[in-house]
Image (cartoon, helix red, strand yellow):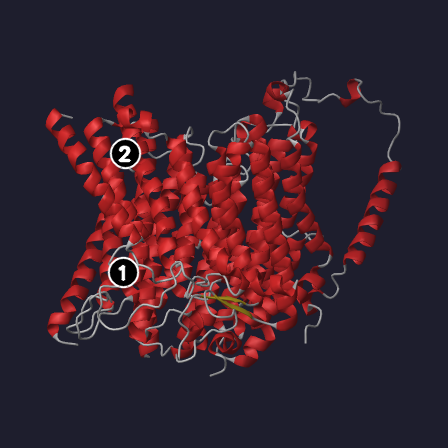
Amino acid sequence: MTGSIFNIPFLAVAALVGIALYIIMSQRNLIKLVMGITILESAVNLFLVTLGYRGGGVAPIFTNAPEGIMVLPVPQALTLTSIVIGVAVTALMLSMIVLTYRHTGDIDAEKSRQMKG
Amino acid sequence: MDALVIHSPILIIAIPLLAAFLTPLISKASNRARDVLVIAALAFTEFLVIVLAKDIYLTGIHVYTLGASSPIVTIPEQYMVPVRIILEVDAMSIFAGIMSATVCLAGAIYSLSCVREETGKDRFYTLLLLLTVGQLGMEFTGDMFNLFVFLEILSISGAALAAFRTRFADAVEGGFKYMVISSVGALLVLFATGIFYAQYNLLNIAALAQAMQYTMLDKIALTLLVIAFLMKSGGVPLHWWVPDTYTPAPAGVSPMIYSATLACMYALYRICFTLYGVALNAATIGWIVIIAGVLSMFVGVTMALHQSDVKRLMAYHVISQGGYMLLGVGVGLAVLDNPEALATYGREAISGGLFHVINHAFFKGLLLLTGEALFYRLGTRDLNKMGGMARNMKFTCVFFLIGALAISGVPPLNGFASKLMIYEAAYQLNPILTIVAMIVSIITLASFTKVFQSAYTGPALSQYKDVKEVPMSMLIGMGILAGATIFFSLFPSLVVNTIIYPAADALIDQAAYINAVMGGV
Amino acid sequence: MATSVPTLDYWAPLVCLIAFVILIAVTYLFRSRGRKQYKKGTAQTEIFLSGEEPPDTEERHIRAYNIYWGFFQGLKRYYDPTIKAHSGIINDYIIWLIALMSITAVILTIVSLT
Amino acid sequence: MSKIVRTIANLLIFPILTFGLYIIMHGHLTPGGGFQGGAVFASGVALLVVAFGSYNIQKRLKEHHLSILESSGALMFIGLAFGGMAIVFFYNFLVGSPIFGRIPPSGPNPGDMWTGGVIPLMNVAVGLKVIAGLSVIVLVMALACSKVKIEE
């Protein structure tokens, strides 16, 4: 299983995490910040799904399942819960941004800041 | 009755969850019925926690497997490893459970009256109960992924509650920051869980602890977990969100968000002591936690001294007193690998840290509630505009004095007892730690005399002539926490021997935790 | 095994209550020996500012911001950067997070190599 | 939105909603389940909100109806979890019972609807909750954004 072909998803995860952290660090616009968090979340989901991969495996569905080994189902269940939580977190953050826009008329992290020091 | 005790670990989590989703329906009937439901659910949870605590101190670790043929079956017949979600409640979890349940009960009773004029009250109580479920779930679960799910429940409901008064711009901003920080932290925890699953195909904490070989990947997972939980519990280099979230939080909610922060600190200790145990190089991680603790103490209190906003000042004290807890348990962690040092002062340090966790949960909750009472009556949190409140708000002033004296470690009250244990134990590891701890304690007293002088004493100002005392339910909420503080101050030895020492031993004793699930296989 | 807490042995609440009562008795003794002839509410209890008219209640109350002025002035070299660091912008929070994570990872790898 | 979009929306809305319910009901056989089916259903609601404007939808699809639906879904889920409380919390008490309890046939087969014990019922409960939850999110956000434009 440790051929070079199987490491590409993990490189993709590393790249996505790097991009996401860069976005969260540098973007002052709050909506882009939320996009960065969603990218980080999809990176972790990709990492979880690729963990369960077994060479030549089939999707773990038992109905009309063809012969041959199946991919591990547990990481996919973890990813499903993480996606559900991601939806809730993103919805909450976006509605808070709508409220900050309504209060301060601005969604820039620096200008819409109320508390300092 | 014993059936109740056997099923109590899951009941403690399921009853508030059931009540959380019942409130929108019950509130269609009447508001009074909803308030009664919320308080009854939380009171029953508190009763269950006490019943479970009594049983744990008698019979040891309680294990509860969800969905198995019986609660005790952790490993199904033809399997070698635990498969289902297992709740594992040892003395340390029930210690944190007692703290969370009491503070949530007091917070809920306190917020009964002061949320009256808000809109969307049934959603407030649903979020309040979900926050309780998140905390108790995190403290009782024995499964890494379950820990992540409860951490997320905690963060989402905490952020939504912090931003509940949407008419204030800073409340929305505080909630948003808490949500951003918590979701990034939780994703790091999920990444670490993924690393564990990649290597050991296990998610259960006890099974992982047994299979742990501390490879390079485990070190990365350890840093991810330690940093994520250090951030969620307000350690200094990452404490920035604490003042922004606590200041605008509604009345009964700030102590509950605080006990959620302590649940994250409990998770940090659970990871370091039980999941990794002696496998990790204890000195390094111990000293990282100690340095974070010492920095938290100093930066927290010096910034608190500089504040002019009551709640923001108390939020900075959350950081500085959290530094004491990190210092206490960090000293214990640093000496985890040489047993005789652990026996002499390591165990003392951990008990001191844990005693300070529960003490501080009570009197910090009390102080946050008094700060909120000032805001409720005077409409402002700025200390420069207040004055002479001792005349009109007598009870709040008495509660404030109890809390302020307790937090600065003045002898009669319980802050002194736990700080003394930390001073004594930390001194034996390195005297500088105790010196800094004492200086910080003095500055804490200084900052609270500032609050007392400018808010409570001084001449009666004209614009606050007609200010009345806070309503009864707020006084009851403060009374519960003040009573708990007084009780812990009068019987420190009793409390330490029954609650704190078993918790410290449970934290150190990793083998018992593993055997409870793996059945000594 | 669970002996009472060694560090808190002398700390019995009863001892404290007795000490507290003794303290109150002594202070009351000192107070009662004071001069009796001052009368409340007369010119004797007025604030004396060497003949100056005392400010009315609003100004007389010492506000919160200038109580510890000396402490902040003394530690100015510590306070200015710390207060500036509490910038309240979320991006700085995450920069601190990533910095600390890399530092801990480096420390852990170095320590475990030696 | 234009006439064309509205008529297409009218045509498309029923296949979308039935497909969503199909995914919920067959969660324990084919890929899917409560959340995915609910999300498909809520995308149908989003299509309606986009096509007919959030104000017209808001008149028919009241927000407190949806919150009752959401709470009842959650209570159904917790009730099913409490159902097996006699033995242990999440116990699958329907296995072997006539309702959903048939033992699934082994080997590759099209799969039997009446297997899985409590799991299909839990899928339905979660599906109800997610339908109501996501529709409320879509509706409230659409209303919040539309209000912002009007206030400016």
Q: Is B121 above or below relative to D80?
A: above
Q: Residue at x 46, y 64 (%)?
A: B66
* Tag in front: 2 or 1: 1
Q: Residue at x 67, y 22 (%)?
A: C49
Residue D73 lies in quadrant? top left
Q: CA distance from mark 2 to mark 1?
A: 45 Å
Quarter in which the C terminus of chain D is drawn: top left
Residue B111 lies in quadrant? top right
Farthest residue, direction top: C53
Q: Label 1 is placed on what type of residue?
A: Leu
| In this picture, residue B15 sits left or right of residue A110 | right
**Pick the front one: B424 or B75:** B75
Quarter in which the N terminus of chain D is drawn: top left
| In this picture, residue C69 sits left or right of residue C46 | left
Farthest residue, direction bottom: B521
Residue at the spot of label 1: D29
Farthest residue, direction front: D98
Q: Chain of mark 2?
A: A
Residue C86 visible in rendering: no
Q: Residue at x 23, y 26 (%)?
A: D53
Q: Label 2 is placed on what type of residue?
A: Ile
Numbered tag placed on residue B172 in the rendering:
none
Residue B59 visible in rendering: yes
Q: Position of residue C16 (x, y in %)?
A: 78, 55
Q: Residue at x 71, y 22 (%)?
A: C48
Residue at the spot of label 2: A107
Q: Is C10 above or below relative to B32?
A: below
Question: Callout 1: helix, strand or loop?
Answer: loop
Q: Position of residue D148 (x, y in %)?
A: 28, 25
